[in-house]
Image (cartoon, grey):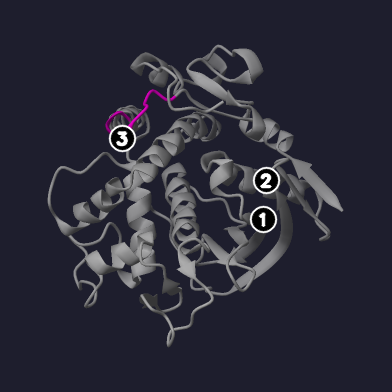
Amino acid sequence: MKIVRLLVLLAVFVLASCDEGLNEGVTSDEVNASQQNVEEIELIDNGCYSGEVYIEHEDTCALSIQCSDYESCIAWGNEVLATLEDNYGSLVEEESVGTDDDSLKVIAKYDVDNGDEVIYTDDDVTDEQLEYHADLWFSYAWLIPEDQREDMNKFEVFESGQTLAYVQTHDDYAEYWTLGMNNENIELASETLVTYLHEYAHLLSLRSTEVDYWEDETSCPSLYIEESGCMFEDAYLANFYWQFWDGGGYDELEEYYVSEYAMTSPQEDFAESWAHFVLTGTPVGDSVVEEKILFFYQYEELVELRARILARVATWLVRSVSLDEEV
């Protein structure tokens, strides 16, 4: 059995070890400092850089978060985003070009131990493949806090000309999930961010706390969404559906969807809108697309999660982009 731990990523992304919290102070200068070339940033204890904190149980780093309630977390997140956009440009830019090959072939399967930050496999993979696949997994795991992905315990790497990533449950009641990642590296850092957050949104909206997998369409007492199941009445996706998809979606992209892919279903609209909620500033207009992003602001727990993820986005970007030299 081949096992790889988070330490593999240290050699790839210069990952360090970093405790995340909602009351740690950070200044604009510190945010800017964390965007400099890695070699120019002063290392502090545990290998984190100035302005970052150590998340011990994950062996990773994140910006120190300066917010303690709903309003301050929105403001802090917007401040971080403004700084990141000044340094890297739009964080939601997508330019991948698909091929005519729409087949999908899984080339390696891994089990994930989130507690020990380990992936392992019995598949016949080379050491080079193992390190590269670990890079893919831990790049995703860096952005999503461990307590938000504890039910994702399997990881697959596949080849496809169309699909960048997917999540799917591998039991009847969605207690455990699989993340699939394309073996080809995504060229744009911004598109990688959107892809990771899009797939996490499916997990967020379709896990067993959101969907009653014991009920079929005929017995569902609330909303049944095709290909997803029977929504609990207070489910995120159910509320999103009632507000934006009851009676059908819209035919036009402009003003109604954050992306063309969002037009395909309520599930994809939810996932794409969630990614823009995290990676763009708070909208100030009243278009439907802005209302979809603002939808997530009604949930205090999601605003807090946005701040936690953005703290990781900042440290992920400075290390990832320092390797590529540009987004």
The amino acid type of the residue labelled 3 equals Tyr
Magenta stretch: helix, strand or loop mostly: loop
Q: CA distance from mark 1 to mark 2?
A: 7 Å
Q: CA distance from mark 3 to mark 2?
A: 28 Å
The residue that disc 3 covers is 70
Secondary structure beneath label 3: helix
Query: Residue drawn 49% across and 50% down?
Result: 196
The amino acid type of the residue labelled 1 equals Asn
Verify CB contact (< 8 Å) between mark 1 and mark 3: no
Verify CB contact (< 8 Å) between mark 3 and mark 2: no
Neighbor class of circle 2 (other Cα within 10 Å; few <14, some 14-19, many 20+) is: some
Secondary structure beneath label 1: strand
Residue 327 seen by the camera: no
N-terminal of the pair, mark 1 or mark 3, is: 3
Residue 78, given in percent of the width and then of the height, sits at 29, 32
The residue that disc 2 covers is 114
Residue 65, given in percent of the width and then of the height, sits at 43, 25
N-terminal of the pair, mark 3 or mark 2, is: 3
Verify CB contact (< 8 Å) between mark 1 and mark 2: yes
Residue 62, given in percent of the width and then of the height, sits at 51, 28
The residue that disc 1 covers is 153
